[in-house]
Image (tube, rainbow, N blue to C red):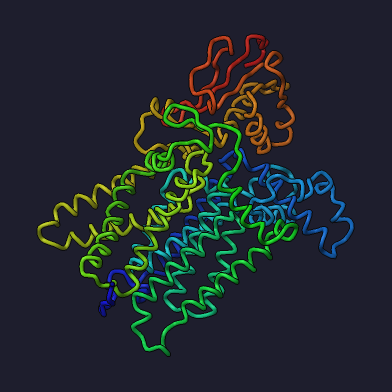
Amino acid sequence: MFRLKATSAPPSLPLAEKPERGRRLAELLFFGLLLGLGLLLVGDYGVSWDEANNHLNGLVNLKYLVSLLPVGEGLRQHPTFATTPDIRDFPDAHHGPLFEMAAVVVNYLFTDHDSRSYFLVRHSMVFGVFVLGVWAVYQLGRRWLGSWRWGLLAASLLVASPRFFAEAFYNGKDIVFMACFALAMHTLLRLLARPTPARAITHGLAIALAAGIRVQGLQQLLFTALALALTAAGGGFRQPPGARPAYGRLGVLATLTALAGLVSIWPYLWVHSVPKLLNVSAHAMHYPWKFTNLYLGQFYKAAEVPWHYVPVWLLVTTPVAYLLAAALGLGAAGWRWAQAMVRRAWPAGPGPALDALLVVWLLGPMIVVVLMRASIYDGWRHLYFVYPALLLLAARGVQLVWQWRQRGVGRPLALVGLAVFGLATAHTAWRMVRMHPFQNLYFSFLSAPAAERLFERDYWGLSYRRGLEWLLAHQSQGPLRINVTWPSYHPLYNNTLMLPPAQRGRIHYVPLAEADYYISAYRWHPQPYPDSVGTEIYTLRVEGIKTLSIFRRPRAGAGSR
């Protein structure tokens, strides 16, 4: 049996911090510059594979919502809704619609309704939510690590994560869900710091927000139960009965608020029923994606990837310095609990509870995916929401090394470690600048030939925009007769939507025998193409990785350049 050890929480891991000089200015500069950078870069990215269908999901839900509201007949009969499927017939209506509905409404109110305007505003909104997630990670680090400076380090590591930064402009599913999940974790820590009904309700609403993006956000209820139980065991039961926070009641209140909030923002549940949530969750876990993944040089169906698929993708796409620092932070959390086990004393204070929460946040979902044999594809994007936990543990690892520098024996080694981490992070940032706007092709330590042979490249299809712009610049007049292998037509078409209307009209999709050009992003064809496809006239390489090729077909006329 564990006994409670009546010691205070370690001073380095409080739930709150004392005011520190310069914090407000640092926050203003960091987040102001981040927003400014996003506005500066938002026009550089293409349109990803899923965005058109995600937009349709928003329209489907809004169409049903409009049918229930006392609005004018003109809005109900809007031409867009006339071609929008009914929510009962739309196969992807079980996808969380909250962000997509908001994107449709904002664009309807504030743009000229051209597709380029829509995607520029949509990408700006995705980045805005990403910044909110960065802020949540900052707050989590500030509370857990005891200083706004360490919180700012964790937030900076998220910004300096190449794939996440790129996808922060167009991935309205996984990046938005990650941000909302981190925000819900922040509200959970606020609840632990001051367990009041108001904070329980706020936390429940944050859970509903995350689940409204992906139903997996309801996992937050399990994290909430774990955190409340550990906090109660670590200190709440040492207080007199009348002074103990009602952790159980607060957990129930947060749960009811989350479920009520989710139902209120998800029209799909109005059409069906709340028990449908179980079916939605099961469907999301085993989504019937009909294509294959290139992984370690072989193609796998989404439901048949090896157990190590997610860990390996995480390793090859996360900066090595972050992984090493996170391993150190993970080891520190495990060491604290191991000491408690040896002493048979339940660790007191909030620090150990937060250690356990972060470790479960990072590892728990990955273990569930392996045990449930969930469908995973397009890298490890479905588990992006665990990445903030990894970065917080990395910041904890750096904090430990920083503290070791004050010790005589370990000081030289600690200083070297800090210098290496700083230089490695700066090198990652420089690679991001050099790769722009294709940071989504970042591999931390693989050579270009190895990456081409072993893993998918531009599975979002963003490089098609660069290819189209090159063709338009090099054939200034007349139609461009283009062929792509199905289903790559979808990302090619999506990226025409970012072109000016006049240029958009020059793109013609034709059978291969009639095409002047063939374009490939190598998604399901990692090997080189035979000469019979045509002459390769343009190649896009990102850090040496062959990302997109344009071939002039043998039938092309002399004027096609």
Q: In the picture, residue 434 is in which quadrant?
A: top left
Toward the right, the furthest residue is 73
Q: Eyeballing the image, is 554 above or below 325?
A: above
Residue at (43% x, 90% y) in the render: 242
Quadrant that contains the C terminus: top right
**Which quarter of the image is occupied by the N terminus?**
bottom left
Q: Is residue 205 above or below residue 128?
A: below
Would you place residue 223 above or below residue 417 in this image? below
Question: How many numbered circles are shown?
Answer: 0
Q: Please state the horizontal and vertical placement of residue 110, each as a whole percent of the image.
A: 72, 55
- The answer to which image quadrant residue 216 occupies is bottom right
Instruction: Spot the residue most to the left.
Output: 409
How far from the left and from the top, in percent, is residue 279? 63, 53
- Residue 387 in view, yes or no: yes
User: Relative to 140, is 348 on the left or the right?
Assistant: left
Q: Give the percent coordinates (x, y) of residue 21.
A: 35, 72
Considering depth in this image, is 321 or 346 the residue closer to the camera?
346
Tell me which residue sits at (33%, 47%) in the image. Answer: 323
Q: Choose between 503 and 399: the one closer to the eye.
A: 399
- 490 above or below 424? above
Q: Quadrant of residue 332?
A: bottom left
The residue sitting at 59% across, 48% down in the picture is 284
